Amino acid sequence: MGFEQWKEELEKNYADTVAWRRHLHAHPEPSFEEKETAKYVLEKLESFGVDDIQTNVGNGYGIVGKIKGKYPGPTVALRADFDALRVKEEVDLPFKSKREGIMHACGHDGHTASLLSVAKVMAQHKDELHGNIVLLHQHAEEVLPGGAKSMVEAGALKDVDYVFGIHLGADQPLNQVLYNVSFGSANSDSFTMKIQGKGGHGAAPHDTHDALTVGTQIVSGLQQIVSRMTDPVKPAVLTFAGFQAGGEAYNIIADTAEIKGTVRTLHKEVQQKVEHKLKQMSEMIASAYDATVEVDYKKGYPSIKNTPEEVEKVKDTFLSVFPESEVAEVKESMGGEDFAYFLEDKPGAFFRVGAQAPDNTAAFPHHHPKFEIDERSLLRSGEVFLAIISTYLQG
Ligand SMILES: [Zn+2]
Ligand SMILES: [Zn+2]
């Protein structure tokens, strides 16, 4: 009884899990449009006998279900996202995307299939559980404002004590289960600056306020924010990704300029400081040259902040049940992931599960048209969920 038996049943269900993943892969739907995907997930959860299923949770097609244990105990939520991307698939597979320009290029089809498989197994073992499992099938992870925040606001974590999620990693070896003790991803913000100067003749600069040179002063001046103003042991990235000014002519001074970029930080106080200095300095620089600048700063997903005690607890289970696996701590990523909103509400953690085929060391990155996962990772990600369940609910 317990983990070993659940794991055996998960293995028996592997062929079905792969078939579900392939169905989802062939029928991808982009963020906020996952109508058929949600229907597919709902049908499966109903057929497994999952309780209290809610649909259209939050600002899209989110689904929440519950597996109620026989004995009292904590409630553990497990999350899998199910949206695809607007990417044209270039992998030649029998289950290649049937929808032009849309692709499961981040592995969310795999997350969904493995959580479904876990739901199927655990719905058969309710009478062993000391507590409950909440299944969070989340829509729209890839596009702001994301689905997670709205699911939390809709009460998806109301009776939940702990929340966990996983992400498959096509660039991590199949055998790895990776964790961060604290931060897992970054506050991922973006900004646009519109500089208004005064254009004019290239031979009469004194009659103009050159928006292009003001822009260059801003780009070089703001490099000081990360190098001189933020705490060196708390990371920050300020990237200028685009700069548009002037036109085809050799003799016209630019009237306007537009700059865009991204800010990545882990700590809230660093995020606030970078935002403040970015606005303040660009305005002061523009004004020194008699131009103006309008800064539109958009906050993206917050950083994932894992709960160290829960990471330690679950990690100990991993080490004992995956003796052949490499269970390791990794450096935090400066990418963004809206699972962060669940962890702002309840303690828990986010893990990465290796999905790179052993013979495919030149794996294509997530969101690439040639992105691929090794399907054996579906089994491992399911086992990770089972290990989490056994940590909290095995009595
Ligand atoms: Zn992604
Ligand atoms: Zn993803």
Image (cartoon, rainbow, N blue to C red):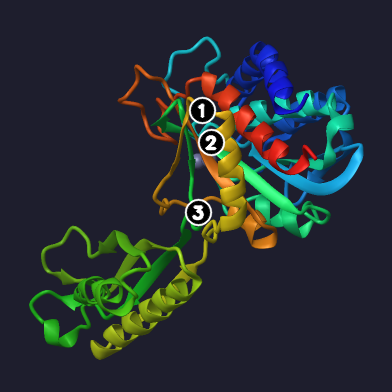
Q: Which residue is mark 1?
A: 323
**Residue drawn at x 40%, y 66% as measured from the top left:** 192
Would residue 171 be found to the left or right of residue 200 on screen?
right
- First in sequence: mark 1 vs mark 3: 3
- Rendered position, 289 above or below 106: below
Q: Position of residue 38 (x, y in %)?
A: 74, 33
Establish if 93 lies above or below 195: above
- The residue at which mark 2 appears reads as 319
The answer to whether the residue labelled 1 contacts the one labelled 3, judged by CB atoms less than 8 Å apart, is: no
Amino acid type of the residue that numbered disc 3 sits on in the rendered structure = Val
Q: CA distance from mark 2 to mark 1?
A: 6 Å
Q: Position of residue 339 (x, y in %)?
A: 60, 50
Structural distance between the alpha carbons of marks 2 and 3 = 15 Å
Occupied quadrant, residue 351: top right
Q: Residue at x 60, y 17 (%)?
A: 22
Q: On the rendered structure, is 126 left or right of 251?
A: right
Name the residue that disc number 3 marks: 181
Residue 202's tag is: none
| Front-most of residues 296 and 342 | 342
Q: Residue at x 59, y 45 (%)?
A: 141
Q: Residues within 10 Å of mark 1 (few under 14, many from 20)?
A: few
Q: Quick one: 196 or 283, which is closer to the camera?
A: 283
Residue 329 lies left or right of residue 81; in this view the side is: left
Q: Does residue 383 lie above or below 303 as drawn?
A: above
Above or below, 101 relative to 300: above
Q: Amino acid at mark 1?
A: Pro
The reply to whether residue 63 is visible in this rendering is: no
Mark 2 vs mark 3, foreground winner is 2
Answer yes or no: disc 1 within 8 Å of ligand 2.
Answer: no
Q: Are marks 2 and 1 in contact (CB under 8 Å)?
A: yes
